[in-house]
Image: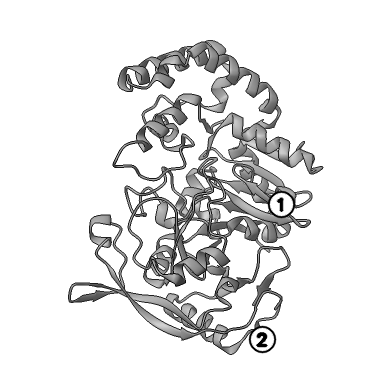
């Protein structure tokens, strides 16, 4: 039997509940690897009755025996990494031989966070988490980024930090915080931090491909969501990397022909954090009700999420560009008390109707959603663990989504805990 190499992708604007699903699926795999993003992601899982939010370490870390990889496509804030390692270890998790950090991952340094905050203070802000993610990726592609492996080359490291800081101070000359930041302090702090996580650094491309040769199963975990992808999302209101399934290859060193399963995850409604068009956004009591019941606040920033009805136009597009083979629906229990539930099936632009998703925000912002109405199931699905026991109204809702998208919904999450899941 061939080994499973799966990718788990968020299909909306992030916050779909990927952390819980990775946690549930982890026992089927030998390795869970994160392939992009940084500490701007917040993957929430409930383990032994306690809630944890992981930002960098893959969500499979609480499954005994699973190896967890932070891949080369990520950007790592050493401060956030060490804080997270401390949290996990306090829960009795031994990371020795279980956590592996790519030597080729790029680093987020203090000046990246300063620049991010400066950019977000302007009128044309994107709505980032101000965690320095975008500026770190910018340096990566401008060929002046600092990799984990550079921490072994002290003279090179010191020179790179000094050159980068001089360059940034000349551009952001009004930033008093940047003026006060010295290359020596960045360098010295970085070496101290490296001393604490050096033991986890590895040649992860080799580790992962050796595991494939040994017929091990690997789950590749994305952060954010497909509609925030730098290429396929609602640019410029996007993240700075590729959460889509293609990013799993470039972010880990696993070749495309090795991947044999792409799992897509979406909420029973839609949310978005930050700026940008959102065709099904609700500004009425329904939107407020979804927000309150769903506790829709960002796991990383605590910002309230914008809420709206499920957008099947956007969802079908996301499934297409990711090559989804199985679907996971989450948080449908949030809709348990609604008399009526709407799903968007088309957009209207003036007199024209379409079921195509347009990533150009200057066009998408004019989209008017057209809805199909469903009768609410008016029953708690929270403790149901068999598909056959679900209310008929809920089953009709699920079947319509499957028919519209053309892909089976394999997993139905009915609550935040591990055991609140239905497998069809």
Tell me which label, 2 or 1, sits earlier in the chain. Answer: 1
Residue sticking out furthest to the bottom: 392
Residue at 67% across / 55% down in the picture?
45
What is the crowding at mark 2: few (fewer than 14 residues within 10 Å), some, or many (at least 20)? few
Q: Distance between the residues labelled 2 and 1?
A: 32 Å
Q: Nearer the viewer, residue 315 or 66?
A: 315
Foreground label between 2 and 1: 2
Residue at 36% across / 45% down in the picture?
126
Residue at 18% across / 72% down in the picture?
350
For residue 391, above or below residue 18: below
- Kindly state the secondary structure of the residue where label 1 is placed: loop
From where the camera sits, is residue 170 visible?
Answer: yes
Q: Nearer the viewer, residue 366 or 62?
A: 366
413 relative position to 315: left or right:
right
Q: Where is residue 318 in the image (x, y as percent from the top left)?
A: 42, 63
Q: Name the residue under label 1.
A: 30
User: What numbered label is drawn on residue 388?
Assistant: 2
245 relative position to 217: left or right:
left
């Amino acid at each position: 039997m061939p080994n499973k190499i799966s990718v788990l992708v968020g299909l909306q604007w992030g916050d779909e509940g990927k952390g819980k699903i990775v946690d549930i699926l982890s026992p089927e795999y030998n390795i869970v690897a994160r392939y992009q993003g940084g500490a701007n992601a917040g993957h929430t899982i409930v383990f032994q009755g306690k809630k944890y939010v992981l930002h960098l370490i893959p969500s499979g870390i609480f499954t005994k025996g699973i190896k967890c990889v932070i891949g080369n496509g990520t950007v790592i804030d050493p401060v956030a990494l060490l804080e997270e390692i401390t949290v996990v270890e306090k829960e009795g998790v031994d990371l020795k031989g279980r956590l592996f950090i790519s030597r080729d991952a790029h680093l987020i340094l203090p000046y990246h966070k300063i620049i991010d905050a400066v950019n977000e203070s302007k009128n044309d802000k994107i709505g980032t988490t101000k965690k320095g993610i975008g500026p770190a990726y910018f340096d990566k592609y401008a060929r002046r980024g600092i990799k984990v492996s550079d921490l072994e080359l002290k003279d090179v490291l010191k020179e790179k930090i000094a050159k980068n800081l001089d360059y940034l101070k000349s551009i952001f000359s009004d930033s008093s915080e940047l003026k006060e930041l010295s290359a020596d302090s960045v360098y010295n702090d970085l070496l101290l931090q490296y001393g604490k996580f050096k033991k986890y650094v590895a040649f992860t491309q080799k580790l992962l491909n050796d595991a494939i040769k040994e017929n091990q199963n690997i789950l590749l975990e994305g952060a954010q969501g497909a509609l925030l992808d730098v290429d396929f999302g609602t640019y410029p209101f996007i993240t700075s990397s590729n959460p889509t399934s293609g990013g799993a290859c470039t972010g880990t060193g696993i070749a495309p022909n090795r991947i044999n399963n792409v799992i897509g995850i979406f909420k029973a409604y839609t949310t978005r954090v930050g700026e940008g068009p959102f065709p099904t956004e609700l500004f009425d009591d329904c939107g407020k009700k979804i927000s309150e019941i769903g506790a829709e606040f960002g796991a990383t920033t605590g910002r309230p999420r914008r809420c709206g009805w499920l957008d099947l136009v956007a969802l079908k597009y996301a499934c297409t560009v990711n090559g989804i083979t199985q679907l996971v629906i989450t948080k449908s229990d949030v809709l348990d008390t609604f008399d009526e539930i709407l799903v968007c099936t088309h957009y209207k632009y003036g007199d024209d109707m379409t079921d195509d998703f347009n990533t150009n925000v200057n066009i998408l912002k004019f989209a008017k959603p057209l809805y199909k109405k469903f009768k609410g199931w008016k029953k708690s699905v929270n403790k149901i663990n068999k598909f056959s026991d679900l209310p008929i109204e809920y089953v009709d809702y699920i079947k319509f989504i499957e028919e519209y998208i053309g892909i089976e919904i394999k997993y139905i999450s009915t609550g935040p805990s591990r055991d609140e899941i239905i497998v069809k």
